[in-house]
Image (tube, rainbow, N blue to C red):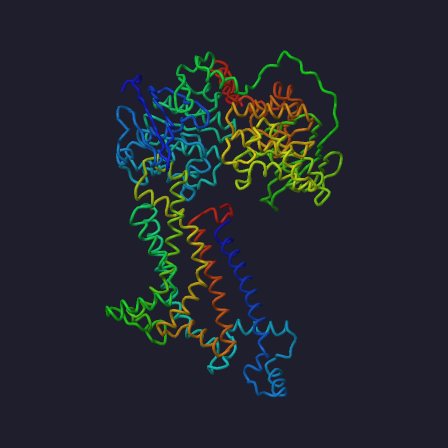
Amino acid sequence: MSPAENVLEIENLNVVFGGEDHEVTAVESVSLSLRAGEALALVGESGSGKSTVGFATIGLLPGNARTTGRIMVGGTETTGADEKAMRALRGNEIGMVFQEPATALNPLRRVGDQIAEVIRNHREVTRAQARAEAVQLLERVGIPQPQTRSRAFPFQLSGGQRQRVVIAMAIANRPRLLIADEPTTALDVTVQAEILDLLRDLAKDSGTGVLLITHNMGVVADFADTVAVMHQGRIVETGTVRKVLTDPAAAYTQKLLAAVPRLRTEASDEIRPSKPETEAVLSVEKLNVVYGRGPGAVHALKDVSFTVRAGQTLGIVGESGSGKSTAARVALGLIKPRSGSVELFGQELRAGRGGRALRAGIGVVLQDPASSLDPRMTVAQAIAEPLHIHRRSLSRSDLDTAVKEALEQVNLAPSLASRAPQELSGGQRQRVSLARALILKPRLLIADEPTSALDVSVQQSVLEVVAELQAELGFACVFVSHDLAVVQRVAQQVLVMRSGEVVETGPTERTLLYPETDYTRRLLDAVPVPDPDQQKIRRQARLTLAAGA
Amino acid sequence: MTWPSFLIRRLLQALVVILLITVVVFGLLHSLPGGPARGILGAQATPDQIAAFNAEQGLDQPVPAQYLAYLGDLVTGDLGESYTLNSSVSGLITERLPKTLVITAGSGLLALLVGIPLGMWQAARRNRLADQVITGVSMIAYSTPAFFLGLLLIIAFSLNLPWFPSQAPQGASAGAVLAEPAGLVLPILTGAAAMIAVFSRYMRGATLDNLNQDYVRTARAGGTGGSRLLWGHVLRNSLTPVVAMAGYYVPVAFGGALVVEQLFNYPGMGLLFWSAAQSSDFPVLLGCILVISVATVVGTLLADIAQALIDPRVKVGQS
C-alpha cells in the first residue's frame, strides 16, 4: 500500500436513530477521507454527531441505528458488513481508543490478558506468545515495569496508565486506522500531552491513519493534519489544520473558535486597575485533612492557607488528586479538617447550628449539572429549596417572585420554572444550579469545575453570567478548575496545588504568566493552544524541557 | 490487603456476629414463660421444686455468670435437653442437620447451576420470544407457594408419571439418604424452583447491565464477540451481585426446608423445628434458631470470600 492511499473513505454517510415513535438524524451526508500516516480531527460540540461517525466506522452503533452511505476502511467496505466480518476487522484493521479510561477496561481481568486477547482474536499465536507480546506493547506505550504491570488489574493503574493500556490494545495488531474518541478529555493536561505524544509517535512509526474525535481545539492544533468541523450532524467545514484554525471560512467555526478560552502567554497591554483591598470573606489557615490512619493514611491537604476577598475570584488549579476540590469542601464545612481554621465572614466556622447559619451565606455550583439537580424536582423547586431551609417565613408569592428574579438573573426564561431538569440542556441546567446558588444572595460562591462538563460556547455564556452577577452583587468566588485558560480569564488570584500542598499563589496575571515553580510551568506548558504554529513551538519547547530534565 | 489478613478479618467479624447471636438466643432462653424450670417440671410443679431445680441447674446465679456458663456449654456442644423428645438438643441437631443440608445445599447448588447460565442466556436474547417465555415461567415459579408447587410436582411426576417417589428417602443419616437419589429429586426441585427464578432474574439484569458497560465496548472494538465476550468478560462481572445474594438466601433455604420436609415427610431440621414449635419445646427451637443463624453467618462469609475470589477489588475495599 502506498503511503498516500486512503485508509478511510466515508461517502455520504447518514445515521438515523429510531426511537419508539420518532427518529433522530444524528449524521447527515458526511463525506471524509483520511490518508495513511495522517491525522484527521473531527471536531464539534456535544450532539454534533462526531462520535457517531467513529462508531459507525468501527460498526459499534447501538441496535436502533440505521446507516446509509459508504464507509471503506483500507479498501474494505464496512457498511452493510455482518457482525462476523466486522469482528475480523475490529482490533485488526481498525483500533479504537475511548474517552473514559476509568471504565474502558474489564475491571476483573489482568491488563496483559486483555491485550493478549486482542492479539489472539486475530492471529494464531499461543497464549504465552500473546502475553509476551502484550508486555512488549505495554513497554511501547510507555508503561514502566511492563512485565509486572501486565499482571496488574485496571484498578491498580492510574488513569493515564489505563489509557495507555487501551491504546496498547488498539494498536496490538498494527491497524491501518486508529479511531481516538476524546482520548484525553478525562486526563490531566500533563498526561494529555504525553498521550498525544505517544499517539503521534505510534502513528508515525506504523503509518496508521488516526481519526481523532475531539471538542478541544488545542488538541486539534497539537495533533491533526486536517480538520472537519461538524455541527448538527453535518460537516460545515473541512481543511488543513492551519486553514481551519487560523482562517475559518464557516460562520459556525468562527463562532466556535471565538468561544475557546485561550491561554495567554504574554502580558496583555491593558492594565487592569488594581482593585482596592476589600474585606476578607473566607480565610483558611494551615488546613490539614488526613484520610485514614497509620502508614496508609492519605494527606489530602497539607498546611493549606488562602484568603478570598469580597468581589474577587480565587482560582484553585492543579491536577486531579491535588486537593483542589477538598480545599473547597472544607470551606463549605463538608469536610472536617484535622487541624487549622476556617474563618467565614469574620467568624470561625464550626459544626452545628452556628455553622449552618454561616453556611447560608455560601452558594455552591458543582461540576456535573446532570447529577447535581434532583430529577424529581422542577426547576422552580430546585431554585427555591435553599429558601425553604434558610428563610422559612417567606410566603408562597414571595417565593415565586424570588425564583422568577433568580431565573432572570441567569438569563433563563421564567417559563422554564415548571420544567424538570432533564428537559433542559447542559448549559441551562448549569444556569439553574447557579440561580439556586445565588438565591440567598450569598457573600461567597464556591464553584467546583462549574463549566468542565459544558461545550465551549455554553461555557462562555455561563462564565459571562457569573462575571456579570459578581460585578453586580459583589460576592467573593472560589473557582476550582483544571482549565488554566478559564482560570486566567475569571480569577484575580490563583492558588496552584499539588498533592495537597500549595505550590504557589499570587495574582493570576503574575503567576500564570511568570510562574516561579517548575510544576506550574509544566502545567502551563502542557496546555495546548488552538493555533497550530504556536502549538508546534510550545510542544518543541516542552519536549526539550522534558528531555533536559 | 493480602489473602490471610482478609480472611482473618472476615472470620473475626463473623465470630463477633455469632457471639451477638448467642447473646440474643440466651436472652430468649432466659425469658421463657415461667423459666426453664416450669418448662421441664410442668405446670404442676411447686415453687419449692422450682427453686430446687434452679439451684441445681445454676439458674439462681447472676445473669452474666449464667451466660458464661451457657457459652461454655455451647463450646462443648451442649445445647440443653429437649422438653419432649427425651434427647439432648445437640443430639437431635447432629442427627437432623446433615439431612436438611442435603436438601438445602442441593436446592441452592441446583439454583446457581441453572439460574446463572439461564439468566445469561436470556440476557443475550433479551426481549425475544424465548426470553419472554422464560420470564413468564420464572414469575410463575417465584409466585407459586412451595407447598403448592411440591404438590403439583408430586401429582405430575409421581402419580401421573411414576418417575420419582412421592416420599423423600427415610434413611437415618445423610449417607443413607444420598443412597436413594431418586427420592431427592422432587424435594430438591421444590426447594430450588423459586431460587432458580430469583437467581436467573438477577443474573439476567446484571448481564444486561454489563453488556452496556464501556469495557464490553472496548472488548468488542478489539474484535472479541459472541460467546467469548459473554463467558470471558460479562460472566465474571455479572456474578458479584448474584453471589452476594446467594449468601442471603441461606435462611430462605432453611425456611423452605420447613415446607419441603413437611410435604415429602422428610425428618430433617424443618420437621424438628415444626414439631418443637407445636409442643413449645423451647430448647430445641432455640437450638435450631442458633444453628440456622450460624449457617446464615457462614453463608454470607462464604459469599464474601467468593466475591473476593471473583473481584480483586473486594479485598482492598475499593469495589
> Hey, which quadrant is residue A169 in on the image?
top left
Q: Position of residue A181 (x, y in %)?
A: 41, 28
Residue shown at the point (51%, 59%) measured from the top left: B11
Vertical side of B177 occupied by A19: above or below: above
Q: Position of residue A27 (x, y in %)?
A: 37, 26
> Hey, which quadrant is residue A227 in on the image?
top left
Residue closest to the far front: A397
Foreground residue, A180 or B6?
A: A180
Q: How many marks?
A: 0
Which quadrant holds the N terminus of chain A? top left
Residue shown at the point (57%, 16%) measured from the top left: A265
Report whether B182 appears left or right of B270: left
Report whether A428 appears left or right of A128: right
Which quadrant holds the C terminus of chain A? top right
Vertical side of B63 occupied by A407: above or below: above
Q: Position of residue A243 (x, y in %)?
A: 43, 12
Report whether A122 appears left or right of A489: left
Q: Position of residue B317 (x, y in %)?
A: 51, 48
The answer to whether residue A9 is visible is: no
> Hey, which quadrant is residue B246 in on the image?
bottom left
Foreground residue, A59 or A22?
A: A22
The answer to whether residue B16 is visible is: yes
